[in-house]
Image: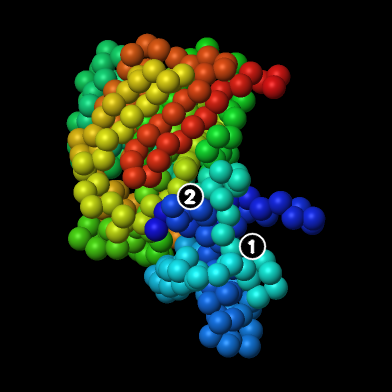
């Protein structure tokens, strides 16, 4: 499935709900399950649906494989009904994709870890500093913890951050954890992945490198925003992860192109490393780090106000962000 978080406007406010793409429609999975239960003559369809297929993405992921299975069953059921598809009290279940606003697929991850897992990228950035790749990089996957409270979604504008003169994009794939675990073997690690999404780890390079001279960070140079989206694709939808083509465009011009298969440290290795003596949880986000050539730093090209950045990884889609001045 291609899972999304989408916003619904109601008389009592705007709510973000979990859905699944179906062609040009978005299926509200919680309400689809309510309809399925009601048609099975279940006495308490709303109560059971909220427990089995929760309406928000983090709760949905915490439900694990049984929630995924129930959501698939409900989606398949409502999309084959021959008549108008509504909930028991005439609630909407199907929405036109062009009429809904997508949020980040996981707007509130419990944690965000971003790795530097592509050898070509760390080689290029090390060269910029007049250094070789540290030999320690080859010993274990290296990551920093980002700000999980500054997630932005597709088509959500990014206000010009801080006083940077070198705002950069970073072309990444991310996996989202779907099961709690600790001391996970590399062989079993992929079983803990709920799905994949595109990640743009925006960076204020001048501020980042200034603070990292002190051998901590990055922090302020990245903490202002990380974009995720447009959807969370379950692993069964991607036949060959290594074959994925990763593209970045700025104002329609291609700036970067890479292949995920060039990664040095796999997601399975990342999960095994992080979970050693430490528990990982549903909703934890693991960024791959930037694919080789996948950022402006490597080309000495930086963003400016008004630029539109598009990261594309199919079959996930296109993650689009416009940079706006701080006054807008």
* Label 1 Cα neighbours within 10 Å, binned few <14 / some 14-19 / many ≥20: some
Residue 40 visible? The answer is: yes
Mark linked to residue 24: 2
Mark linked to residue 243: none
Q: Is 73 on the left or on the right of 95, as rendered?
A: left
Question: Judging from the image, what secondary structure is the residue with disc 2 in?
Answer: loop
Q: How many marks?
A: 2
Against 151, residue 293 (above or below) is above
Q: Nearer the viewer, residue 83 or 321?
A: 83
Residue under label 1: 92
Distance between the alpha carbons at the discs numbered 1 and 2: 16 Å
What's the residue at 37%, 34% (across, down)?
A: 312
Residue 129 visible? The answer is: no
Q: Is 40 on the left or on the right of 7, as rendered?
A: left
Tell me which numbered mark, 1 or 2, is placed earlier along the sequence: 2
Q: Position of residue 243 (x, y in %)?
A: 21, 41
* Label 2 Cα neighbours within 10 Å, binned few <14 / some 14-19 / many ≥20: few
The C terminus: image quadrant = top right
Q: Position of residue 134 (x, y in %)?
A: 23, 28
The N terminus: image quadrant = bottom left
Quadrant of residue 296 within the rendered picture: top left
């Amino acid at each position: 499935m291609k899972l999304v978080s989408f916003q619904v406007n109601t008389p009592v406010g705007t709510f973000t709900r979990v859905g699944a793409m179906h062609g040009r429609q978005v299926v509200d999975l919680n309400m689809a399950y309510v309809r399925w239960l009601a048609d099975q003559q279940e006495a308490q369809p709303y109560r059971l649906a909220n427990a089995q297929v929760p309406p928000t993405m983090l709760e949905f992921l915490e439900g694990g494989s049984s929630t995924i299975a129930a959501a698939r069953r409900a989606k398949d059921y409502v999309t084959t009904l021959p008549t108008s598809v509504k909930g028991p009290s005439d609630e909407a279940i199907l929405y036109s994709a062009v009429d809904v606003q997508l949020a980040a697929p996981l707007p509130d991850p419990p944690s965000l870890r971003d790795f530097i897992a592509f050898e070509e990228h760390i080689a290029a950035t090390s060269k910029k500093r007049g250094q070789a790749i540290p030999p320690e990089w080859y010993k274990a996957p290296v990551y920093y913890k980002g700000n999980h409270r500054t997630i932005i979604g597709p088509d959500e504008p990014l206000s010009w951050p801080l006083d940077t003169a070198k705002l950069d994009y970073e072309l990444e794939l991310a996996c989202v954890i779907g099961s709690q675990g600790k001391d996970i073997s590399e062989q079993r690690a992929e079983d803990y992945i709920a799905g994949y999404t595109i990640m743009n780890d925006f960076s204020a390079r001048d501020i980042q490198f200034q603070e990292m001279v002190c051998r901590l960070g990055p922090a302020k140079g990245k903490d202002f925003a990380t974009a995720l989206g447009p959807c969370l694709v379950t692993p069964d939808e991607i036949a060959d992860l290594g074959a994925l083509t990763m593209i970045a465009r700025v104002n329609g011009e291609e700036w970067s192109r890479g292949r995920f298969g060039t990664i040095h440290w796999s997601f399975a290795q990342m999960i095994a490393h992080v979970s050693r003596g430490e528990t990982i949880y549903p909703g934890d986000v693991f960024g791959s780090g930037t694919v080789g050539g996948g950022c402006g730093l490597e080309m000495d090209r930086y963003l400016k106000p008004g630029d539109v950045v598009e990261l594309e990884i199919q079959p996930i889609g296109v993650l689009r962000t416009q940079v706006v001045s701080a006054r807008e």
